Amino acid sequence: MKVLIVSDTHKRNAGFYDVLETVGPVDMIIHCGDTEGAEYEFEAAAECPIYMVAGNNDFFSGLPGELELMIGKYKVWITHGHQYYVSMGNQILKDEAKTRGIDIVFYGHTHRPVIDISPDVIAVNPGSLSYPRQEGRQPSYALMDIDREGEAHFTLRYVE
């Protein structure tokens, strides 16, 4: 199973469509918020299930603030992260995930990509496709591949 994780597109949608074309068919798409009204376009473009949450800039969105779902054997939590102070680090978010019995938390908000694998919880921020803030400022996204044994593997990718 191949899952595309994106965030913080801020209605600059060209990067999203480019990534869809680049990565080829995926089984699921996760958007960690700040679509700024583009969720309907993303739903129309996705040829698979797409799960999206509202970010701090999705003022009038009908998207949920958070989602929990199962992906394979993993209990997954999707949140934008701003309510968990992720700009100061992801420890509060990871502690909340542990409290909820979450295996993997996907979040955004910081516009900086992170794959943080610890024994208790995996925290993944795909960065931003539109306004990257990490050193080098390359737009980024993440892929989660679940192998035949059901194990998840994560990759950060950058758009040139």
Image: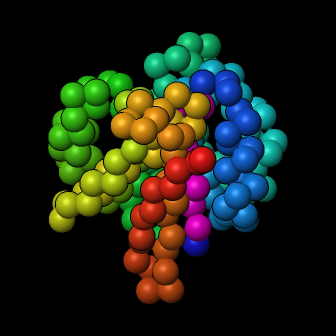
Residue 104 placed where, x, y %? 35, 56
Q: Is residue 3 magenta?
A: yes
Q: Residue at x 46, y 19 (%)?
A: 56
Residue bounds of the magenta highlight: 2-9
Q: Residue at x 67, y 24 (%)?
A: 11
**Dominant secondary-structure state across the stretch colored magenta:** strand
Determine the image quadrant of residue 13: top right
Horizontal placement of 17 versus 73: left or right? right
Q: Residue at x 57, y 61 (%)?
A: 3
Q: Is residue 72 magenta?
A: no
Instruction: From this view, report whether residue 106 is shown above or below residue 34.
Output: below
Q: Is any part of residue 66 visible from this angle?
A: no
**113 or 151: nearer the eye?**
113
Horizontal placement of 2 versus 114: left or right? right
Residue 109 placed where, x, y %? 41, 29
Residue 23 placed where, x, y %? 67, 61
